[in-house]
Image (cartoon, coloured by chain):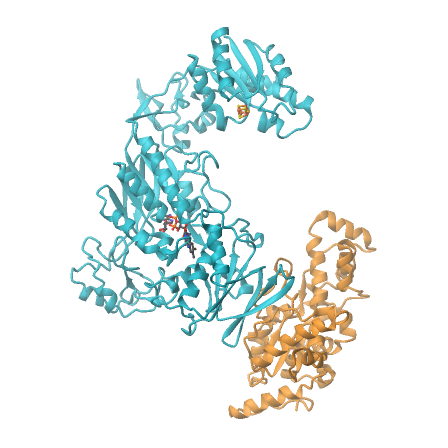
Amino acid sequence: MSTYAYYPGCSGLGTSREYDTSTRAVCRALGLTLADIPDWSCCGSTPAHTVDHTLSSALAARNLAQAEDLDASALITPCPSCLTNLKMAVHRMRDRDFRDRVNKLLDRPVRRDLPVKSVLQVLVEDVGPEELASRLPDKPLAGLKLAPYYGCIMNRPPEVMQFDDPEHPTAMDRLMLALGADVVPFPLKVECCGASFGVPRKDITARLSGKLLETAMDLGAHAMVTACPLCQMNLDLRQDQAASALGRKFQMPVFYYTQLMAVALRLPQNVIGLNKLCVSPHIAFAAMRKARAEAGRRDPSFSEEVA
Amino acid sequence: MKIGVFICHCGSNIAGTVDTAQVARTALEFPDVAFATDTMYACSEPGQEAIVQAIKDHGLDGVVVSSCTPLMHEPTFRRTVERAGLNRFMFEMANIREHVSWIGKDTEANTRKAAELTRMAVEKLRRNMPLFAKQFEVNKRVLVVGGGVAGIQAALDCADGGREVVLVERESTIGGKMAKLDKTFPTVDCSSCVLGPKMVDVAQHPKITVHALSEIEDVKGFVGNFEIAIRRKAAYVDWAKCTGCGLCMEKCPSRKSLDRFNEGVGTTTAINIPFPQAIPKKAVIDPAFCLKLTKDKCGVCAKICPTQAIDFKQQEALFTEQVGAVIAATGYDLFDISKYGEYGAGKLPDVITGLQYERLLSASGPTGGHVQRPSDGREPKTVVFVQCVGSRDKSVDRPYCSGFCCMYTAKQVILTRDHIPDSTSYVFYMDIRAPGKMYDEFTRRAMEEYGARYVRGRVAMIYPKGDKYVVRGADTLMGTQVEVEADLVVLAAGAEASQGAGKLAEKLRISYDKYGFFLESHPKLRPVETNTAGVYLAGSCQGPKDIPASVAQGSAAAAKVLALFSKDKLENDPMIAAVDIRRCVGCGKCIQVCPFKAIKEVDFRGEPKAEVIETVCQGCGLCTATCPQGAIQLAHFTDNQILAEVNALCLA
Ligand SMILES: Cc1cc2nc3c(=O)[nH]c(=O)nc-3n(C[C@H](O)[C@H](O)[C@H](O)COP(=O)(O)OP(=O)(O)OC[C@H]3O[C@@H](n4cnc5c(N)ncnc54)[C@H](O)[C@@H]3O)c2cc1C
Ligand code: SF4
């Protein structure tokens, strides 16, 4: 299979290290070759595009230029925020004048039209849930009930992201089903979690994230599964804040979808990084086992950490 | 030749940026110009009289008016010169308003361009010839396409005026959307009580023939002499035998068929009469659901039909009707609400359209007039109405207002309270558009007497929560977000052009806008005419309209048809093609390109020649551009006249 230029994003080295390690491991296990972009730099993140579109696109585009030597078929990133900045830069640079202005700011101008995709898109389109399911005939996550949460920007705006349904995405659902898990009909898949408002107005983030947790809980989900470092942090780290904002108690494990894939593929626990999660994932696995026992299903063997 | 030139000020419209007096002075130097002046309003009565006077005083042979677009006033000025004794074709018009003063601010350049356009008109006029119209017979039957309330009104008015009417309806019954409505604003009178008698009148009128389940296949001919090919779909029932008794519906075992009349709320039988008051009241088999037609099983209807009307082998039929005029009244369709993914529309069972809600309210609807949720049949206590779904929203390419949804939502709010006294209704709106007579009073009643909570703002999202639906939106007056837990959500789906409207327009050779609504010939002054002679419009095929406006247009279109038919003979437009047989080599290229089949081949002393059928030619000019010999020429637009205009421009 072809090579993908890999952009981990800054959270991948910090707050979402487990997302990065599990992503790399899952890709390797499924035969996707990732090549790190040499000397990659900040994508512009949230601040840049609120100030200047050209400068912000130049920050993102520098990475596109850096990736050109890798002979990759696409540039991929796990982080939806990085994805937005990179894709938006590509989108805006379809306009010649804009492209010229961006290139003028770069030491090394962008020459190729390298497609930018999320890791999720590549796993769904280039590997596919069918292939994944056929590798896991024992349905390792059977019994686990998940609420898949995509966040606000993974699929939107649709004309830029060009992947999945902008209001009712299903990519993660399909991957989780392929692992044997159940997904609840979670209606708030693309709702705002409060995003970076957690810093200036944590009351807002607590309320918005709380609503997501509450809805997942009321639907009987054992855990939530996300694809975004910021969403994961808001949902996982702020459950106490959410609890006091809504007057309810939460104990909802929040996984990265790649972590659950890694669990199902029995990858080593150091790359899965379950110990990095705030709410103990064991609650979810215990519920899964119970559901399985009730259904008279045998337990597949897992690594120690899951057990 | 003596030519008079009149340069119009159009108040300040033209005179503001064109030195009209200077243009008149310049025009005096053009060849054959014997008189030139500027004038305040050429089209006004004194303006026209001045033209008549000048023709008489100066013995003019032709007149040029440089003013606005000829679309509006060319006929006016032609009549003016005729009054003074000239042939109406000894007149030319230069458009120095739309083409000059309205598009440029530089007075000097504008004045120069106005003079140049005037010179072109003068050069053309120098080569004009008096032309005379020929008369032809009028077929005084009229075709009405679409049997909604607008088409019904038009058909009845024409028939009462003594004319034969052919009414073509796509569905198996006439009635259109109004037949599906429960009550109607602003009087809250029962829709079928008002419409039903009119439908019966249509059925019983000796001068009206209804072709239901039919569509227009092709249109040939021209005003006074149209030939309409009509395709009738297979009903699988011989309507000559069907008495509408409905026995077949009682026995049909295929009960899961799509109920089109009830807008998909509930299901119906594969053989079906859509509603008790249907006109014609005839059964139709839906081939997608019929067990006999899909699996060659069953056939129970054929066994029990008392008149042996069932015919599983029935085919479509193609036939023609001859008429002199056409009224298009094809109405509208509803915007597809599933395009709003964030509303779960099309996915969530209790998020429905306003028209579906009408069927839930209607005593003859699938629930017998008991308002019930489609999902579980429960009576809703909290109903949320969302206005402007698929209207006034550029993101779904529907920037226009559908006009009637504010009003029908208010009506539905009132009816909801009448049906379920302990219910609460919420209405999310952008602003209330209620400009008709008694309309604003009506919406106020919904708010003040019926206690509906009107929330000004858009809805962002609708999602299920337990067995309820959370409707989240903005309250822009309070500046907050609001959430309502609803049992039922009714989306006021906007109107869009009826399916296939564009294709029909092309067959009728009328224009339509980018959304598929038919274009009237003038938005203010010719609202029911089109740019094709003999084709008229009525109702919401021209743009969303409520019932009063649709009916008014139906009557207006009928009046136009009756006026047309008051003449025994019509005059053709003499601006048609003519063949110079000395030049014609009989190649037949013109015959191939003519879209109206107006040219035939004749034998002239053993040689083939083209000949124009004068009553059929529409003067489009395709043949003149095609003829390699220059043998076929369009009167009033000959090659010589057009070249003279081009030369005049190059000379300037
Ligand atoms: C939910 C709802 C509630 C409403 N309530 C009210 C109300 O209370 N009061 C009010 O004044 N207005 C109301 N309206 C508006 C009302 O429906 C329209 O004003 C009215 O139906 C317009 O009539 P029409 O004849 O122009 O079009 P339609 O009713 O759409 O009729 C058009 C007819 O033409 C037929 N047709 C279409 N294409 C073809 C074709 N190619 N060949 C042959 N036949 C064709 C159709 O089948 C149909 O029978 C409401 C609308 C909605 C959606
Ligand atoms: S002729 Fe045309 S330009 Fe002149 S006054 Fe009338 S409308 Fe205006």
Q: Can you tell me which quadrant of the image ligand 2 is in?
A: top right
In the foreground, B577 or A16:
A16
The residue lying at 82 percent from left, 53 percent from top is A105
Q: Give the position of the C terminus of chain A as an image quadrant.
A: bottom right
Looking at the image, residue A126 lies above or below residue A133: above
What color was chain B assigned in the picture? cyan
Q: Is residue A77 visible?
A: yes
Q: Is residue B499 visible?
A: no
The residue lying at 30 percent from left, 31 percent from top is B565
- B199 lies left or right of A50: left
In the foreground, B88 or B151:
B151
In the foreground, A55 or B432:
B432
- B327 lies left or right of A292: left
Looking at the image, residue B215 lies above or below residue B292: above
What color was chain A assigned in the picture? orange
In the foreground, B294 or B333:
B333
Q: Position of residue B622 (x, y in %)?
A: 45, 29
Q: In terms of image quadrants, where is residue B88?
A: top left
